[in-house]
Image: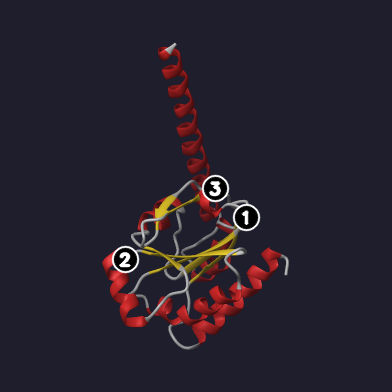
């Protein structure tokens, strides 16, 4: 009896691993196919079309941890719209849009939207930054390079912001930004318009 349960458990685990690998491979192939369909060496094509490589895609399985060690994964964000802002502390456009991002996080309730700021910096660097600059209204995730490059397979620079709907599909993608006072106003307008549409407001 014990051996049979062991075999069943092993088979179940194998199926789960194969499913996750298949989903991940399918996502990356779809992104690759999209990028290969445009001449992204030309700047005008890159910014016009790269969002099309991600919007409508189901986000691959992932596990990340916030500054307090809390797990964030596909299951924990399910059922709510999720905004993920990718950034790092030495990125001027990332810093310039922060006031606008903080205002957005105050506009929508925690029951409606998850706000996550995934940084490529480590925990200590983020702590020093927050001590200097003040609170960031998003849930902070350090060491997010693998999440950005390998799991989500994003080819753009920083900042990059995506919005995922309650079913786990990417509905919004915006990369790049300004490094002056206009950045805050621009990101606020873009994200609020997208969120209101996704939330049906």
**In this picture, is 76 found above or below 121?**
above
Give the residue displayed 52% in from the left and 46% down from the top: 27
Query: Residue 123 appears in which quarter of the rendering?
Result: bottom left
Task: Answer yes or no: is residue 148 visible.
Answer: yes
* Mark 3 neighbour class, 10 Å CA radius: few under 14, some 14 to 19, many 20 or more: some
Q: Nearer the viewer, mark 3 or mark 1?
A: 1
Location of residue 103 in the rendering, given as x and y in whole percent from the top left corner: 54, 79
Give the residue displayed 62% in from the left and 55% down from the top: 166
Q: Name the residue under label 2.
A: 121
Task: Answer yes or no: is residue 122 visible.
Answer: no
Going from N to C along the chain, the mark reached first, 1 or 2, is 2
Is residue 160 or residue 200 the one in the foreground? 200
* Mark 1 neighbour class, 10 Å CA radius: few under 14, some 14 to 19, many 20 or more: some
Q: Which colour scheme is used?
A: secondary structure
Real-space CA distance between mark 1 and mark 2, rounded to the nearest whole angstrom: 28 Å
Give the residue displayed 28% in from the left and 70% down from the top: 125
Real-space CA distance between mark 3 and mark 1, rounded to the nearest whole angstrom: 21 Å
Location of residue 94 in the rendering, given as x and y in whole percent from the top left corner: 42, 76
Location of residue 173 in the rendering, given as x and y in whole percent from the top left corner: 55, 64
Residue 30 disc label: 3
Residue 166 disc label: 1
């Amino acid at each position: 009896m014990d051996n049979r349960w062991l075999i069943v458990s092993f088979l179940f685990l194998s199926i789960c691993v194969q499913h996750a690998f298949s989903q991940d491979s399918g996502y990356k192939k779809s992104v690759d196919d999209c990028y290969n369909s445009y001449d992204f060496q030309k700047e005008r094509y890159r910014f016009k079309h790269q969002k099309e490589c991600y919007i409508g895609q189901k986000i691959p399985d992932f596990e990340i941890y916030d500054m307090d060690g809390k797990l964030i994964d596909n299951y924990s964000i399910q059922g709510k719209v999720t905004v993920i802002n990718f950034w790092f502390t030495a990125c001027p456009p990332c810093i310039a849009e922060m006031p606008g991002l903080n205002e957005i996080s105050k506009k929508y309730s925690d029951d409606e939207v998850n706000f996550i700021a995934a940084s490529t910096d480590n925990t200590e660097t983020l702590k020093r930054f927050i001590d200097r600059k003040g609170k960031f209204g998003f849930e902070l995730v350090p060491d997010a390079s693998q999440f950005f490059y390998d799991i989500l397979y994003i080819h753009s620079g920083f900042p990059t912001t995506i919005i995922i709907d309650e079913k786990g599909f990417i509905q919004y993608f915006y990369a790049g930004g300004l490094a002056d006072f206009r950045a805050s106003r621009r990101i606020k307008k873009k994200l609020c318009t997208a969120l209101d549409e996704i939330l049906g407001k």
